Amino acid sequence: MQKINISIKGMTCASCAATIEKVIKKLPGVYEANVNFATEKMNVEFDPQVISVSNMESAINKYGYGFTSFPSGTGETSDISDSKKNAGKNIVSETSAGCEVQECKINSINSDSAGRIFSSQVNKADKIKAEKTDELRKHRQKVEFVLPIAIIVFAFMMWEIAAANFDIAAFFIPHRLYSVFLLAISSVVMFWIGQPFLRGIANFIRYRAANMDTLVGIGTLSAYIYSAIIVLFPEVRSILNLPDVNYFDVVIVVIGFIYLGKYLEARSKYRTGEAIEKLINLQAKTAIVIRDGQETEVAIEEVMSGDIVIVKPGGRIPVDGIITEGFSAVDESMITGESIPVDKSVNDTVIGGTINKQGTFKFRALKIGQETMLAQIIKMVEEAQGSRAPIQKLADRISAVFVPVVLGIAALTIIVWIAAGSQFMPLSQAFRLGLLNFVGVLVIACPCALGLATPTAIIVGVGKGAQNGMLIKNAESLEKLHKINTLVIDKTGTITIGKPKVTDFILFNGDLGKKTTAGQEGIDMQKYSDEKTALKILASLEKKSEHPLAQAVVEKAMDAELELEEPDSFENLEGRGIRGRLNGQIYLAGSPGLMQEARIDFDEEVVKKISIEGKTPILFSTENKLIAAAAIADVVKESSRPAVENLHKLGIKVVMLSGDNRNTAEYIARQVGIDEVFAEVLPGRKAEIVKELQIKGSKVAMAGDGINDAPALVQADVGIAMGTGTDIAIESADITLLAGDISKIPQAIRLSKQTLRTIRQNLFWAFIYNIIGIPLAARLFYPLWGLLLNPVFAGLAMAFSSVSVVTNSLRLKFTRLR
């Protein structure tokens, strides 16, 4: 099975999307098809052994639709093959181990292919944009021709209406001459500007496929033919006793206004896709790589996994990788939404598309082409923008049957007016009113606003999220998020930084009943009275250990810019600590148990206090005297407490899960303001806790970053992964926070609420517009209150209803999320 994303041309309304979807789904070998009118794209799953893309295009060609910018007729694959997916990964690992030349060549070829695939997708996006720009230009040219004429004719219409009802002189142009002039102009408008509407009629006759163009086409062509008979064959008018009134002005103004509406709608929809365009433009075009010992500038698609890439100040990082030499500050705002540059040094990862602010560095390319984070973001945003929210299903169902129903209402309208109206007025007048009502119903009943209501808001909402470091996988997740009333958060890596750090470094004097910090008087061991000296000795020993707590001590010393020494000897005491000799002196560092074993006195109250605070103590001593204690903990992120406060303001209960002991978990919870704590939780238990909360009636979102969080992320109503976490967690989640910052969670919830509010507004106005407009156009209120709707105003209202819906959706771009 293959899944592809295809751009479609020729769609004019939601019923077009429904028609294409229906046709494609009926084809053998097609498993699923989803056509999005707002994005003008189709996601389709099919068996390439049974049906080809060209077969699908042939099936919809006869209805007047086609595929846009399709490279080689194969489509845009959602996944590349495993060999390409893993392209070049072996180069990095196996080159260091001495891989064989042939294998490296194969991997290099695959890496190059992956790069070219992504590059071709970028080129395809550029080509589609160029085609849409050209299409908009042609639309604008037609609008520039027809709109001035429509406005002038509309002014004459208003003059005629005013002259007939008020004491105003009629305009001076002879009626016959003016009618001939309108016949000529309306012919040009009908058969040139109105070509899409005429094609809609032809498709309806040939394939029984009706859309908005069909409605407008039947209505305006009926008015045109009737008027042409009145003007060209006066004897027929006399025989049928028809009034000398034509509706060429209605044809001109209706088509003019509707075409203006189509142009404005297309331009507005063009703007909704700016998020994707901006992401694509972040891709660097070239890269400087080292080839044969020389710096060589190559096209981005020629970068291979394993290449050493040089990035200079102000340059855009071309692909994902890891720094091998140098340091800099990198602007990662396009990934995280945060404007403050991030310091980078050796062994830090860099992301393609981000900007090097200062310094020159080298990095080894690890992910290229579709493997890069930027490519994955683009893919995820496109899929989310093309997905359907549950709230859209009602609108889709209505749009699918709307056009046939409207055709029936229009036909019934003219029949009833002729049959019933002729009982109260002359037949000719009843026929004239019936015709006007027929045209009005067809023109005003277009379901475009209904079809655009949800997808345009989703497109803008998902794009807004991506620009602020929140990747939303699908529209359903965005809709569900606003209903969340409970947030379950994993502690490590989510609330905390996920990395042990030295939070306190305490020096002791000879009297262990008292403790004193560096710099205080009365310390017996003057050699160790300086904090930097004691820390330097401890870190010099700990650098030989691979334990994470030891690494925290070393990092503390490095942050203090201490120059570490080489121990004379070193011994790792499994599970207890270390013993080492430095400058002839033996030292011990480790747990309280190690101190007890060595018969070294220590202050148990200090150790107890450190433990109660959720920190791990490392005691440091000579062979017989305690020197210091280092308190190590996974510290709370600065953003965690404000984020929890914001969640409380949104009425959301915050629950923390942790595998740590209860003291540690509750200490962290108190710091942050968590409502409920589950401590000493085993990995498999996390999903059970989420399920228990759901059974109690809670709508649960789960935020986590580890492999052990994946089941809970799937179980939750909405799973939220930290972008700094594991790939498995990210794949399991519905939303990914690229910066790994939980302050983005309340922002995502606000975005969800605002997006759903916008959708409801759009749907309300779309429904109200049709509910009121159709009876008004059919003149159902005319016998009672004399209310009627001229087809001209119906056309104007229809044209701007779609524009208003898209414009309302675009307001989401300016929503404040903080």
Image: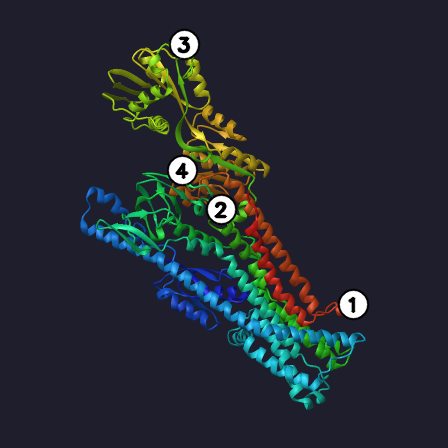
Marks 4 and 3, how far apart in space? 48 Å
Disc 1 marks which residue? 784
Disc 4 marks which residue? 706
Query: Which secondary structure, mark 2?
Result: loop
The answer to which of marks 1 and 3 sits earlier in the sequence is 3
Q: Residue at x 32, y 27 (%)?
A: 547
Query: Which secondary structure, mark 3?
Result: loop
Residue 522 circle label: 3
The answer to which of marks 4 and 3 sits earlier in the sequence is 3
Disc 2 marks which residue? 468
In the shown orientation, is residue 86 left or right of residue 36? left
Say what amino acid the circle numbered 2 marks: Asn
Marks 2 and 4, how far apart in space? 23 Å
Where does residue 725 sit, x and y in percent of width and height? Answer: 40, 40
Task: Count neighbours of disc 2 (C-alpha within 10 A) and say few if under 14, some if 14 to 19, many if 20 or more.
Answer: many
Query: Mark 4, mark 3: which one is toward the viewer?
Result: 3
Marks 1 and 4, how far apart in space? 68 Å
Task: Count neighbours of disc 4 (C-alpha within 10 A) and say few if under 14, some if 14 to 19, many if 20 or more.
Answer: many
Say what amino acid the circle numbered 1 marks: Leu
Q: Nearer the viewer, residue 562 or 739?
A: 562
The answer to which of marks 1 and 2 sits earlier in the sequence is 2
Query: Which secondary structure, mark 4?
Result: loop
The answer to which of marks 2 and 4 sits earlier in the sequence is 2
Query: Mark 1, mark 2: which one is toward the viewer?
Result: 2
Marks 1 and 3, how far apart in space? 103 Å
In the shown orientation, is residue 99 left or right of residue 43? left
Name, please, the residue furthest toward the right. 167
**Discs 1, 2 touching: Cβ within 8 Å:** no
Say what amino acid the circle numbered 3 marks: Gly
Where does residue 325 sit, x and y in percent of width and height? Answer: 29, 41
Marks 2 and 3, how far apart in space? 55 Å
